[in-house]
Image (cartoon, rainbow, N blue to C red):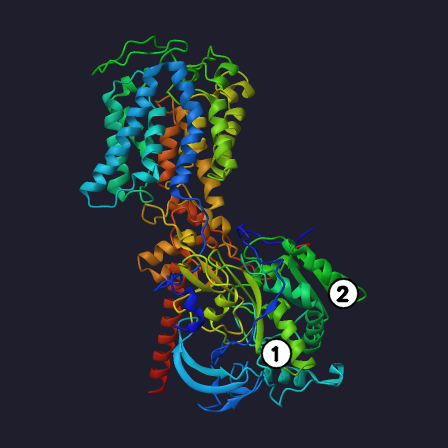
Amino acid sequence: MAYTFKGGIHVEEHKHTSKCETVTVPTPPVVKISMNQSIGAPAAPVVKKGDSVKIGQLIGDVPESALGCPVHSSVSGTVTGIEETRVTDGSIHKVVVIESDGENAVHESVTPFTGNIAELSRDEIIRRIRAAGITGMGGAAFPTYAKIKSAVGKAEYLIVNCAECEPFITADHRLLLEDADSVIAGVKILLRATGAPQAYIAIEDNKADAAKKVQKKLRGVDFITVKMLKTKYPQGDERQLIFALTGRELAAGKLPADAGCVIFNAATCAAVYRAFAEGMPLVRRTLTVSGDCVKTPSNLSVPVGTTASYLIEQCGGLTKTPEKLIAGGPMMGQAQWDPDMPTKKSTSSLLLLSADYSKKPATPAVCIRCGRCVKNCPMRLMPAYIASFVQKDDMENAEKYGAMSCVECGSCSYNCPGKVEIVQYIRVAKNHIRTEAARMKAAREASENK
Amino acid sequence: MNENIKNNAEKMPDLLCVSPSPHIKSTDTTRSIMIDVLIALIPAFAWGVYMMGLRALVIGLLSVICCVLFEAGVQFILHRPVTVSDCSAAVTGLIFAMNLPVTVPLWMPVVGSFFAIVVVKQLFGGIGKNIVNPALAARVFLFSAWAGQMSRFTAPGNPVSSLRITLGDVDAVTGATPLAALKNGVVPSATVGDMLIGNIGGSIGEVSAVLLLLGGVYLIVRRVITWHIPVAYLGSVALITFLFPQTGTGGMFMLYELMAGGLVLGAFFMATDYVTSPITPVGRLLFGVGCGGITVLIRYFGSYPEGVSFAILIMNLLVWYLDLAGMPKRFGAVGEKVSKK
């Protein structure tokens, strides 16, 4: 019996690369490493133009007190500049540009941990995970050390998220098939760090081969169990994942720890393991390059900061003109405007989709009140009503109808026969409500200080 | 541009499209849904043509064409984008025609189409914005203005082939419908089997219960409509008529009431009209029960034999409140809910 949740949608999978072995790309001639790799404060560069750097060397740091992750060089070479540019999500941040010398020399700070992890204190494990710059690699990029801290003493279950419910992406699938040992070893470290007594490895049932493989490796380990999930979008959303596995509903604004859970992406677990076994900070990841415009869709192991154009080249180039370049999955990923955009620690895929995917009907977008968005909304909202409030600039009602509970999975927009960009209207509302709340707070503080 | 993509330079567009996610969409459109509704309506309409003659086909085509032309025309005059390609006007036209007796003079479908599309639909903002069902409002409008012509039904087995354009009534052998008999407190002469197949008098598209049911099941299987409204509507009518029969036994009376008049057509095709029905499951159930209750009240105590049109129109006005009442409980709103899993 596969675990699942209520609502959601069935999306064509497009998992063209699930049989493609991960290929390590030749070191790119140049990497552009954003200082904004995770939620929280961006890192401040600690290198300057002309410095020579090696793999694993610290290039950006965040003060201990702030939420954020240090950033390391992913190649060896020379820093040719620190640019201030727009990054994947549209915000402006510092980007360290490093020209590779092709030697891939590893920095001397990278040394394997040879001791017994079981003897390390919890704080020491967390300190090392933070120093390795590990962030969530599923997409949201929450700093892993902070997640562990939030779960200490609360987590009953550690959940490894291998749902990979977004179409096209197969990076985690390949990781489980090719390097399940690292994932499992990472889980063991994270169990010790969080204090959770048991772990679930949650895999959608379209990846039965991976599940079988992991299950085999787990023979004799009774505190880590593989759980099969029904293939449905958005199964990988943390709230739906927790509900499917534990039956607990996590309200908007609450952390998984409030439901006794802590969730890590499979790739994050493997990165944790490497941070100990090799002493290597998070400087590489596996991502899927796919879409109908790519000649050879592939799973690639790439240094953080590799540009999309270089990766497209590694996949044999383009077969037709793409309309969109998407960082992340097609349901929640962000459309990019620059083929030279650099990948980040959290970039799980690059998709090149032709105009075939965004055919528009001849008639204007209009809600015909079919109710599919209500039926599909995993958060059980009434998306059509929220969208229509936003169209009328009635943010008060948009908030009353639960705009802030929206997880932006896009199930509503996907199935809308009227082709209304419902989730985008809700994003507009959320943004407005947040800005307004911040403005009110600032005004209140200002009047109190008078 | 990076020299690594020199080879792809001609393939990579100068400008990439930046748009909000999701970047993939389902292939269902308003148009594909409306075409599904048309497909679902065809068996019952074809039966009407077979039973009542070629004139039924002419009325059907006439109102479809009029609805489409009026929609395009009014949108052109009001400088709105012309949206007839979404096929919603065609659906309105066909459903409206199926609600007419075959004997109506041919100017009536034209007047009705005008009222449905121009007054009820476009003047309220067009698709998605109208408050009441256009086809039903037009039917009730014609019924109020020309009650005689609108209740002149042919006896089964007497098709009308006359295509003569006339301002008055067309010659036809007329007879009482089962609904009228029930209203007068007598058991209809038609058998339950006749009513199931559609060997009875009535409007063009309402006579064959089984073919309407077939169309309704098609819509549910194709996920165009959900089961909530038809089941709640037919279920509540069945329950009330079974418990409080006017003539004969409860079971028999219930079957007659369910298949007489426009109930099956209304429950599957008109009460389920997206724009004028609730979008929440609970709202839809309440809507269906309300329609059923009002239909039976009118049939039992009103001065008209049929209550389906009025019942749906009245419930149309309450949709907003029904959606408020049916608002789903937000995920996590009840706090920690532990199921047995």
**Quarter of the view holding residue A402:** bottom left
Q: Position of residue A446 (x, y in %)?
A: 34, 83
Q: Position of residue B109 (x, y in %)?
A: 27, 25
Cα–Cα span, label 2 and label 1: 28 Å
Q: Position of residue B64 (x, y in %)?
A: 31, 29
- Quarter of the image containing the N terminus of chain B? bottom left
Task: Please report, as a chain letter, where disc 1 is located.
Answer: A
Query: Would you say A65 lies left or right of A229 here?
Result: left
Please identify the residue farthest to the right as the structure is shown: A220
Q: Disc 1 on helix, strand or loop?
A: helix
- Residue A406 makes an appearance in the image: no
Q: Is residue B194 above or below residue A379?
A: above
Q: Position of residue A60 (x, y in %)?
A: 50, 86
Q: Is residue B160 above or below residue A31?
A: above
Q: Nearer the viewer, mark 2 or mark 1?
A: 2
Badge 2 amino acid? Lys
Q: Disc 2 on helix, strand or loop?
A: helix
As drawn, the label of residue A149 is: 1
Ranked by sequence position, the earlier of labels 2 and 1 is 1
**Quarter of the view holding residue A271:** bottom right
Badge 1 amino acid? Lys
Residue located at (24% from left, 24% from top): B145
Query: Would you say B214 lies left or right of B154 here?
Result: right
Residue where numbered disc 2 is placed: A217
Residue located at (27% from left, 35% from top): B117
